[in-house]
Image (cartoon, rainbow, N blue to C red):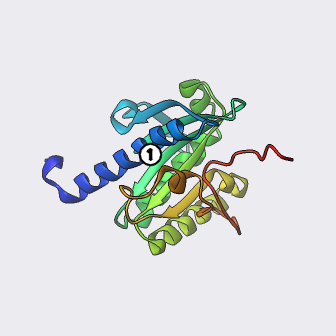
Amino acid sequence: MKGHNAFFLAHTIAVTDVLIAARLLSRTVPDIVLTRLYTERSIKRKIYVASPAGDRRHCIEPDGSLEFVLQGQWQAFFHLELYRTKLTEKRFKHKIASYVAYITSPVHEQLFQTPALDIAVFCHDPHLAGTLRRWTEEVLHDAQQEGLGERFYFRSITDTATTSPAELFLTPVWEQAFGTTKTPLIVLADETT
């Protein structure tokens, strides 16, 4: 039973921390409005994409999803993936390949009525974040979809409970696939320019 599994509970708590932080961010930063929040349970078994060979369908199950309206002008939509322990390379790369199929299909816009889409990958430590970023880059390279690298964000975070919402989303600690600089997950336009 999942309720008795310490790793499952720690993962569930970390996901909940991120979702709560998103709600708090929306309440404390006037230019950021959280318009939709999805738990893993609410989107379970809803996102299906065709395999690259087109012979089967794969289900993508993010740990959660968030939609924000920024500065009253544009949307930002994130599927969240939280990893506390290392998983197999094959399994992770399969998930990224499924995300590539999802991003390049009309499925996301049909399900969520927005073209905005990024994948935010939270990792328990920097080594894991680096490994998952590298595997993502390998999948994107093999699929000749390097341009999609800007949609995949990675960061390490050891304690989601004590990290402030601003630090979680607005601090430039995120790395994009193939990126060379760190960036915030949510970027607000500078109104002075």
| Dot 1 alpha-carbon crowd within 10 angstroms: few under 14, some 14 to 19, many 20 or more | many
Which amino acid type corresponds to the residue marked 1 in the rendered image?
Ala
Q: At numbered mark 1, what does the secondary structure look like: helix, strand or loop? A: helix
Give the side of residue 82 with respect to residue 1, left or right: right
Instruction: Tell me if I can see residue 165 in this picture.
Output: yes
Closest to the observer, 125 or 69: 69
What's the residue at 69%, 35% (across, down)?
71
Closest to the observer, 129 or 193: 193
Give the percent coordinates (x, y) of residue 22.
Answer: 48, 42
Q: Residue pushed farthest right?
A: 193
What's the residue at 57%, 69% (across, down)?
134
Above or below — where is 176 with respect to 110? below
Closest to the observer, 145 or 17: 17
Give the percent coordinates (x, y) of residue 92.
Answer: 45, 59
Count of numbered circles on the image: 1
Give the side of residue 139 with respect to residue 180, left or right: left
What's the residue at 35%, 55% (across, down)?
161
Instruction: Tell me if I can see residue 57 in this picture.
Output: no
Above or below — where is 184 with respect to 1? below
Residue denoted by label 1: 21
Give the percent coordinates (x, y) of residue 68.
Answer: 58, 35
* Location of residue 158 (image quadrant): bottom left
